[in-house]
Structure formats: C-alpha cells, structure tokens
Amino acid sequence: MNIFSGKKILLGVTGGIAAYKSTFLTRLLVKAGASVRVILTPAARDFVTPLTLSTLSKNPVLSSFTNEDDDNDLWNNHVDLGLWADLMIIAPATANTMSKMVTGNIDNLLLAVYSSAKCPVYFAPAMDLDMYKHPSTTANFEKLASYGNYMIPAGDGELASGLSGKGRMAEPEEIMSFVGKQLEQDLPLFGKKCLITAGPTHESLDPVRFIGNHSTGKMGMALAHNLANRGAQVILIMGPSSVNSEHYFIHRIDVTSAQEMYDTVHKHIAHQDYAIFSAAVADYRPATTADQKIKKSADTLTIELVKNPDILASVGAMENRPFLVGFALETENELEHAFAKAKKKNTDLLILNSMKDKGAGFGTDTNKITMIDRLGNAEVFPLKSKELVAKDIIDEVIKRTQ
Ligand code: C5P
C-alpha cells in the first residue's frame, strides 16, 4: 500500500512530444493502485493514441465534449469528472495549454475539466529551452502557482529539437515522487508522531501455555489507520493478534508479554506527540515460567502471579510526556472506576467501554464509548463501528492539542 492506492486520478495529456512519457506515468499510477482516467487534448492525439492509454489505464480515454472521436458513447461531463477526481496531473503541460489555464480560455475538454476540478492540480511543463525561459512562460508558471496549482519543474538535458537545456518533462518516476511527497505533506497530521499499544498480552506459564485475554487489537488497529490516513507516523506496538496492519505510515512492532510491551513502549516514547494505550495488558504474570511443559499430577494446581508494570501509568508519570489517551474496560460502577483510573494514570483522555453495553468491548466490530477528560467531563457516544469510534477519538485528540 502507498499514498496513491485507492486515489482517483485524472491525467491530462497535452500535445507535446513528451506525451509518450504519459503512457509510462499511467502505468506507474495504475500499478500503485490508483484509478486513472486520461483526458487528451485534440493535439495530444497526434502524439499518443487513445488505445494505448485506455489499455494502460483500463478506462476509456476522453478527448472531446461530444465523443465523436472517443471510444465511448457518453456525454463527457467535465463537472462530473472534476468532482470525481482526488487529484489531477497535467503531464506534459505545453506552453499553449498553460496559457489557456491562466486566462481561462476553455476550448477543449481538458481545460473544462481543469477549470471545474475542486481537487489539487499538478502540472509538468514540457517544451523547448527558449520557450521555457520566455517571460510569458515564466509568468504563466507563477500565475498557475498563485492559483494553487503545483508545478513539477522540468529537467535539464537533451530536447526533441536537438538542443540541450531546461524543458524536458520530469520523468514519470520523478512525477510520482513529487506528487507522492506533496500528497503526504498536505495531510493534516503530516509530521505528527503517535505511539499506540493494541491487542492482548500473553504471559507464559510454560512453553505451550499462557495467560491471556480475548482482545483482538481491532480498536487499536482502527486508531492506527485513522491516524496514518491523516498523515501521522504511527508506531503500533501490538500484542499477539491476527489483525492486519499494512499501511505506509504504520510501523508495527509485535510483542508478546506485558514486560516486552513496556520495554518497547519506553524505547520509542520519546518525541511522540500522542500516545494511545488501547492494549488489554495482563495485570499479572506467572512468577516463573517453567522450562518444560507443566505435567498433570495433583488435583489442584496453584500458580503464583506477580504484578506486571503498568505501562500507561509509567508514561503518565513521565515529565515530558505526549498527549495521553488510555482505555478502561469496566463491568460495574463504570464512571466511578473510570474517573479514578484517569486520575491515577494521569491521562488527558480516558476512553471508557462498559461490558454491559451490547456491541462494546473485545472482538466485536463495534464499540460504545464515553470520553472522560482531566476536568471530569464525560461525553457519551452512541454505538458505532470501531472505525467511526477511532475517528471520534482522533478528532477529539486533535481538537485538544491544537
Ligand atoms: O487498569 P486497567 O488495566 O483497567 O487500565 C486500562 C488502561 O491501562 C488501558 O489503557 C491499558 O492499555 C493500560 N494498561 C497498561 N499497562 C498495564 C495495564 C493496563 O498500559 N499493565
């Protein structure tokens, strides 16, 4: 998974020799998991065929309002296309198209879509070196940037004219990297760091047995994904769980026991902006772990347990600690216990679940929470999917840390 996966991208291709590179760009975008719709200017059709681009993009290619020349029968609604897209890339962008983008001269479908698109627009100029340097061109670069478009600068090198200089369209890989970095930077939590604990812990009795609980890690995973989708770098410290965490902004570290989770948290907690402790950590572990499987003998077996370190409380006691969110799963006197826990562990926000609420707690895909803050305010939320609960929690964290 990467920043392009699932993105809806309009690729505008104008009439320049660099149009051949748009075929490679289409392929890279599709390979990265994006849905790509290509729009050609009429002049671009002289340089690259709709058949090539429709095959690579797996979508019909559009180039006119009326479809006479296109390989589909639909009216090409520029407003719909503009609204459909998450981003638009115009590559190559000729001097002619750029000047029309500046002045609002809408004489083809690509320009109509550009002017009605609400999404970020990137343009990759391509032209001969003297055209690139011409004052009208450089003025247009500035104008287009001032309208909020992102320019992907051309490179230096051999040009189609045989001359050498600035004007070569950026290579498809460079365009991918430029757009990818900008998309990341535009995410609201870009640059923020968050550590999350999730899942259960397993405390070994012997090589084959452990003391554990029913936590699946789904809530912590939903939190990790919500943060990562908003651009935060997430360290997810996960107890034994089969839940999948693949995301380019999530660094997952698998642990087994509470002690291992504690050590891993303290190795990474410095410089975090937020820490969310959603793991169901075992409060006790066996005093000793047998080297060999414990054999069945007497009718009763007593196991001595010793207390595990409280990871959340240990971070709550740190001097320069991140904004701290804890969880409390209660079965009785929920609010009273949760208030006491928030105070004892020094959390900024405590998320209370009650086992009495249907659909809340371990294993389910839903949760019902009450948020408790340092001032003793309690906000009750309705039953929601864990994804929407994660959104509510992260929205609240952002609100309180701005
Ligand atoms: O005390 P209790 O286990 O109910 O507290 C729950 C909260 O404390 C959760 O946020 C949990 O992740 C955290 N916790 C912890 N280390 C422990 C026990 C609980 O971080 N040993």
Image: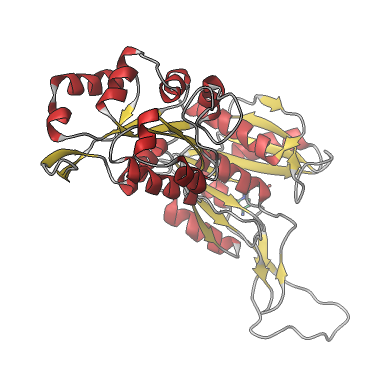
Name the one closer to the observer, 356 or 235.
235
Looking at this view, is 138 or 240 the one in front?
Answer: 138
Q: Residue at x 75, y 50 (%)?
A: 362
**Residue 228: horizontal and vertical position, in percent?**
51, 42
The spot of residue 248 in percent (x, y) is 47, 50
Instruction: State whether residue 56 is above or below residue 167.
Output: below
Tell me how many marks there are: 0
Position of residue 21 measured from the top left corner of the image (x, y, whole percent) = 33, 45
Who's the residue at 33% across and 29% down the image?
A: 150
Closer-to-camera residue (53/183): 53
On screen, residue 358 versus residue 368, left or right, reads right
- The quadrant the C terminus occupies is top left
Horizontal relation, residue 32 to residue 295: left or right: left
- Vertical side of 270 occupied by 400: above or below: above
Is residue 177 visible to the viewer in this orientation of the structure? no
Residue 390 placement: quadrant = top right
> Along the line of sight, which residue is nearer the eye, 72 or 90?
72
Instruction: Choose top left, top right, bottom left or bottom right for residue 282.
Output: bottom right
